[in-house]
Image (spheres, rainbow, N blue to C red):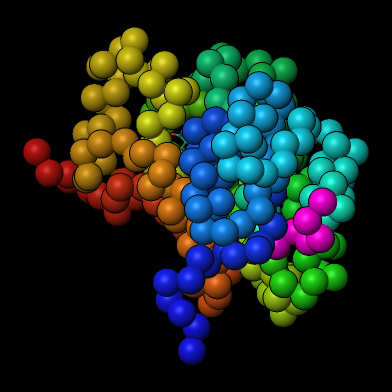
C-alpha cells in the first residue's frame, strides 16, 4: 500500500512558467515542499532566479512566446534532471490596454493572445513529446474563471485567450489520454497577487464590485491555488483529465450571494 503521507511529487520534475510571481511562485514553493525538482521559468530574471534559489531549483530565463526558447527550456530540464513529469503552463498577462472591445486596439489584442494562448500552445507542443517518451505526464494550463463566465468589466482579449486555453486543454487531454498524459485547465477565481492588489488597492469600489459575486467573500490566496495545482500534478488526480478545474470561491456556482 502506498503511504498517504509520502511526499506526492517525490523526485518528479516540474517546469513552471511565470514562476517568479503570484500563482507560479506559490506553486514552486508547494511543489518543492512535496519533493519535486522545480524548474522555474520567467521573463524576469531577478524574481525568477530568487524563486529558483528559494526552492533549490533551476532558473531559466525565457520568453514563453518564443518557440526556440520554449523548446530549449524542456530540453534543459531533461538534461539537468532527466525528465519532464509536470508542466505548469502559467505565465500570463492582463495589461490595462486590454479593455472593452470598443477601445482595445489590435496590438494589445495580439500581445495578450501571444502571451496567454500561443505560449500554452508552444509549451504543450514541446512538453508532450518528452511525456510521450516517458509514457506519463501531467500538464496543467492556467485558464481563468472568465473562460466560463462573462464580465461587464471586460478585458476582451484576456477572456478570449483563456477560453482558448480551456478548449485547447480539453482537446489535448482527450487526444493524449491513452498515452498516460493528463491535461487539465486550472480556472482560478480572482487571486490576491501583486497585479490584483495594484488594481484594487487604488480603487476599493472596483474591489467591492467583484467581491459581491464571490460566495466566500474574499479573493483567493496564491497558496490556495497552488494546493489545487499540486493535486492536479500528483497521482491523487489520476482519473482526471480534460477537466475544467474551477478554484473560484464559488463564483461560477452563484446566483445570489450571502450578505
Ligand atoms: N491573479 C488572478 O486573479 C488570476 C485569476 C485567474 C487566472 N490568473 C492567471 O494565472 C496566471 C498567473 O497569474 P498571476 O496573478 O500569478 O500573475 P503575476 O503577474 O503575479 O505573475 C506572472 C509571471 O509571468 C511572467 N511572465 C509574463 N510574461 C511572460 C513571458 N512572455 N514569458 C515568461 N514569463 C512571463 C511574469 O514575469 C510574472 O513573473 C496567469 O496566466 C493569469 O492570467 C490569475
Majority secondary structure in the magenta region: loop
Q: Which residue is drawn at 57% across and 19% down?
A: 95
Quadrant location, ligand no. 1 = top right
Picture quarter with the C terminus: top left
Front residue of 23/109: it is 23
Q: Does the magenta stretch include residue 37?
A: no
The answer to whether 255 appears left or right of 133 in the picture is left
Quarter of image, res 222: top left
Whether residue 123 is visible here, answered yes or no, is yes
- Magenta-colored span: 80-85
Image coords of residue 195 (percent x, y):
47, 23
Image coords of residue 69 (percent x, y):
85, 37
Q: Which residue is drawn at 69% across and 49% down?
A: 15
The answer to whether residue 170 is above or below residue 99 is below
The answer to whether 150 appears left or right of 96 in the picture is left
Quarter of image, res 196: top left
Image coords of residue 147 (percent x, y):
51, 45
State the residue lying farthest toward the left: 259
Front residue of 149/60: it is 60
Amino acid at each position: 500500500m502506498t503511504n498517504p503521507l509520502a511526499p506526492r511529487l517525490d523526485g518528479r520534475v516540474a517546469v513552471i512558467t511565470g514562476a517568479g510571481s503570484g500563482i507560479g511562485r506559490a506553486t514552486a514553493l508547494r511543489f518543492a515542499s512535496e519533493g519535486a525538482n522545480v524548474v522555474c521559468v520567467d521573463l524576469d530574471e531577478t524574481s525568477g532566479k530568487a524563486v529558483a534559489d528559494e526552492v533549490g531549483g533551476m532558473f531559466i530565463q525565457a520568453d514563453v512566446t518564443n518557440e526556440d526558447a520554449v523548446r530549449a527550456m524542456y530540453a534543459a530540464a531533461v538534461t539537468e534532471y532527466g525528465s519532464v513529469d509536470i508542466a505548469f503552463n502559467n505565465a500570463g498577462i492582463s495589461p490595462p490596454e486590454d479593455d472593452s472591445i470598443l477601445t482595445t486596439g489590435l496590438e494589445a489584442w495580439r500581445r495578450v493572445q501571444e502571451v496567454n494562448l500561443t505560449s500554452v500552445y508552444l509549451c504543450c507542443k514541446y512538453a508532450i513529446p518528452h511525456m510521450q517518451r516517458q509514457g506519463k505526464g501531467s500538464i496543467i494550463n492556467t485558464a481563468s474563471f472568465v473562460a466560463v463566465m462573462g464580465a461587464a468589466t471586460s478585458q476582451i482579449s484576456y477572456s478570449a485567450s483563456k477560453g482558448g486555453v480551456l478548449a485547447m486543454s480539453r482537446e489535448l487531454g482527450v487526444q493524449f489520454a491513452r498515452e498516460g498524459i493528463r491535461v487539465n485547465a486550472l480556472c482560478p477565481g480572482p487571486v490576491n497577487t501583486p497585479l490584483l492588489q495594484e488594481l484594487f488597492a487604488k480603487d476599493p469600489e472596483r474591489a467591492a464590485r467583484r467581491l459581491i459575486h464571490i460566495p466566500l467573500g474574499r479573493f483567493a490566496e496564491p497558496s490556495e491555488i497552488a494546493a489545487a495545482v499540486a493535486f492536479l500534478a500528483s497521482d491523487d488526480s489520476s482519473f482526471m483529465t480534460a477537466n475544467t478545474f474551477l478554484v473560484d470561491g464559488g463564483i461560477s456556482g452563484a446566483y445570489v450571494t450571502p450578505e
